[in-house]
């Protein structure tokens, strides 16, 4: 049955089964290989109530899932990649607003991929945070070890 689903539909199906994606309320807008992720604002995502700032962990997790989703969308792996390492640069305060994300696969190798991602709010040219990560690809027929 998965052969009849588009890559975007496969990705959306996977994301609906990931508990942290459901907890955050994250969603994807997919058009072909082009994807924008959205983290709708919720009070539970506030890390500092005094200044109404989004929690850094929510922002970092959102960016990691955005990177993994983009990698799945543009690759031929059957299962989402596993994180090897990520670096998140927090550039501005995340306000009590929706957060948007986009990722770009920099290098797609046989076993590993390098991905960057950015999150922004009202102005795309003023990112709230940026991620650079390396991911282990789960290709069919290969054993993890």
Image (cartoon, helix red, strand yellow):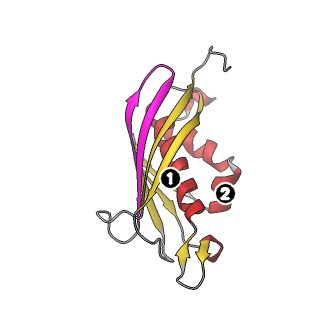
As drawn, 126 above or below 46: above
Most foreground residue, 47 or 66: 47
Q: Which mark is residue 120?
A: none
Q: Are marks 2 and 1 in contact (CB under 8 Å)?
A: no
The residue at which mark 2 appears reads as 22
The residue at which mark 1 appears reads as 63
Most foreground residue, 74 or 51: 51
Horizontal and vertical percent for residue 80?
Answer: 59, 35
- Is 112 magenta? The answer is yes
Structural crowding at the residue carrying mark 1, measured as other residues with C-alpha within 10 Å and reported as few (<14), some (14–19) or many (≥20): many
Q: Main secondary structure of the magenta part?
A: strand
Most foreground residue, 139 or 132: 132
As drawn, 82 above or below 141: below
Tag nearer the camera, 2 or 1? 1
Q: Quadrant of the N terminus?
A: top right
Horizontal and vertical percent for residue 48?
Answer: 59, 77
Horizontal and vertical percent for residue 90?
Answer: 45, 61
Cα–Cα gap, marks 2 and 1? 15 Å
In the figure, residue 79 lies in which quadrant? Answer: top right
Q: Residue at x 51, y 21 (%)?
A: 111
Give the magenta part as a residue range.
103-120
- Of callouts 2 and 1, the N-terminal one: 2
Task: Kindly give the residue lying farthest to the top in the view shown.
Answer: 141
Q: Residue at x 71, y 52 (%)?
A: 19
- Is 99 magenta? The answer is no
In the figure, residue 145 lies in which quadrant? Answer: top right
Most foreground residue, 96 or 10: 96
| Secondary structure state at the residue bearing disc 2 | helix
Task: Kindly give the residue lying farthest to the left in the view shown.
Answer: 125
């Amino acid at each position: 049955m998965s052969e009849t689903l588009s890559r975007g539909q496969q990705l959306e199906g996977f994301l609906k089964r990931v508990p942290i994606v459901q907890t955050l309320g994250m969603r994807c807008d997919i058009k072909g290989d082009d994807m924008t992720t959205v983290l709708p604002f919720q009070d539970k995502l506030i890390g500092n109530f005094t200044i109404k700032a989004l929690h850094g962990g929510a922002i970092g997790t959102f960016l990691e899932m955005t990177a993994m989703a983009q990698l799945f969308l543009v690759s031929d792996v059957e299962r989402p990649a596993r994180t090897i390492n990520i670096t998140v640069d927090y550039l501005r305060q995340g306000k009590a607003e929706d957060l948007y994300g986009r990722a770009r696969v920099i290098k797609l190798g046989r076993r590993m991929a390098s991905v960057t991602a950015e999150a922004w709010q009202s102005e795309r040219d003023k990112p709230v945070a940026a991620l650079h990560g390396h991911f282990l690809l789960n290709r069919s027929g290969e054993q993890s070890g």
